[in-house]
């Protein structure tokens, strides 16, 4: 994507005369169309970076994911007390840092003092590395500054009910960085209202509705937020309601070791013009199964494992 950044910079500079404004628009439209076309191919989505190898949402995990050739870096974003977008999965700090309490109750200066890496060495001794100690939490600004338009970002709005300004702040930042126009970002969420707000702010951003299927009180499957009924009961109308604002769905593949979606779910989503990006797939047998079913992308903590599966399939002529 480096060539897109150079082209955009040149056109914007020359476009100050007003003569090349149509060319700028054409280049941006071309980048967006290319992203939509690329999404029709299988996507390797690095879940919180290469988070199976290094502490999630740190430079270590992101850099490894880029080196492994992932198509998208997946980021979760919360907001600090002073309004900065922070790359962290959990609502609170305890699991992945030495801090305590909700992210939203801490200023950026406080969050930046926390150790976001040492926990990984204790939790994953086989992948431990002394270099991970004292890794710092990152802002979205820092991530964009490091990678620019050279990578694509798959961003989740986390706990949007806690951050009324999250959607507008995120979209404004992505637009200012040229990432929307460059076809460099997908936004996902479990929150349908969050995605619908983003769609209203900028309909050019591809959106993915996350889904979580698990047993309800009566033991039958239900979707966590009520966006759809159980997979076996989904109708075309249910999928069409999502297709009104999103390009795809992101369902979990299993719950507690039991498969919750199948090939028919994926085919039905496709019949309603929706992509299927399933999460979080770390074993190669499951990767192969989902690929056989026709899934369009997988979230994984181990992009290298998924790349191996894809390479093997190419060699054997399955893809």
Image (cartoon, helix red, strand yellow):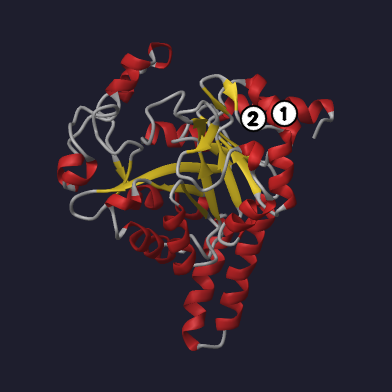
Q: Is residue 175 visible?
A: yes
Q: Is residue 151 visible?
A: no
Of 224 and 163, nearer the camera is 224
| Quadrant holding the N terminus | bottom right
Report helix, strand or loop for mark 1: helix
Q: Residue 278 placed where, x, y %?
A: 59, 36
Of 68 and 118, nearer the camera is 118
Q: Residue furthest front?
A: 218
Q: Residue 222 placed where, x, y %?
A: 52, 36
Q: Are marks 2 and 1 in contact (CB under 8 Å)?
A: yes
In this rendering, position of residue 204 left or right of residue 59 = right
Instruction: Name which residue lies at 45% across and 44% down.
Output: 225
Q: Residue furthest right?
A: 317
Q: Is residue 41 above or below residue 262?
A: below
Tell me which corner region of the image, top left, top right, bottom left or bottom right, holds residue 273: bottom right
Instruction: Name which residue lies at 57% across and 26% down.
Output: 254
Instruction: Name which residue lies at 24% across and 33% down.
Output: 93
Q: Residue 223 placed where, x, y %?
A: 51, 39
Q: Residue furthest top?
A: 126
Q: Which mark is residue 307?
A: 2
Report helix, strand or loop for mark 2: helix
Report the number of numbered marks.
2
Q: Residue 65 placed where, x, y %?
A: 50, 34
| Quadrant holding the C terminus | top right
Q: What is the CA distance from the residue labelled 2 to the residue labelled 1?
A: 6 Å
Q: Which mark is residue 150?
A: none
Of 60 and 155, nearer the camera is 155
Q: Which mark is residue 311?
A: 1
């Amino acid at each position: 994507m480096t060539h897109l950044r150079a082209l955009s910079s040149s056109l914007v500079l020359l476009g100050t005369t007003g003569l090349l404004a149509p060319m700028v628009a054409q280049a941006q439209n071309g980048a967006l169309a290319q992203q939509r076309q690329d999404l029709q191919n299988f996507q390797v989505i690095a879940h919180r970076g290469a988070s199976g190898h290094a502490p999630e949402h740190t430079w270590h995990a992101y850099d490894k994911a880029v080196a492994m050739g992932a198509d998208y870096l997946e980021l979760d974003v919360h907001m600090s007390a002073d309004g900065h977008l922070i790359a962290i999965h959990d609502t609170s700090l305890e699991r992945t840092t030495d801090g305590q309490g909700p992210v939203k109750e801490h200023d950026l200066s406080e969050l930046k003092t926390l150790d976001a890496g040492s926990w990984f060495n204790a939790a994953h001794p086989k992948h431990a590395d002394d270099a991970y100690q004292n890794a710092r939490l990152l802002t979205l600004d820092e991530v964009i500054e490091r990678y620019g338009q050279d990578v694509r970002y798959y961003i989740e709005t986390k706990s949007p009910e806690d951050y009324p300004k999250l959607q507008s702040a995120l979209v404004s930042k992505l637009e200012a960085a040229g990432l929307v126009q460059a076809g460099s970002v997908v936004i996902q969420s479990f929150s349908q209202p969050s995605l619908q707000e983003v769609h209203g702010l900028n309909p050019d951003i591809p959106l993915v509705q996350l889904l979580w299927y698990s047993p309800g009180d009566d033991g039958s499957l239900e979707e966590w937020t009520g966006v759809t009924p159980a997979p076996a009961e989904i109708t075309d109308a249910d999928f069409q309601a999502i297709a009104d604002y999103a390009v795809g769905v992101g369902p979990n593949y299993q719950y507690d070791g039991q498969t919750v979606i199948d090939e028919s779910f994926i085919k039905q989503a496709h019949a309603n013009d929706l992509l299927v990006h399933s999460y979080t797939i770390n074993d190669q047998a499951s990767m192969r199964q989902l690929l056989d079913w026709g899934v369009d992308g997988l979230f994984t903590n181990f992009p290298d494992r998924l790349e191996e599966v894809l390479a093997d399939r190419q060699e054997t002529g399955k893809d």
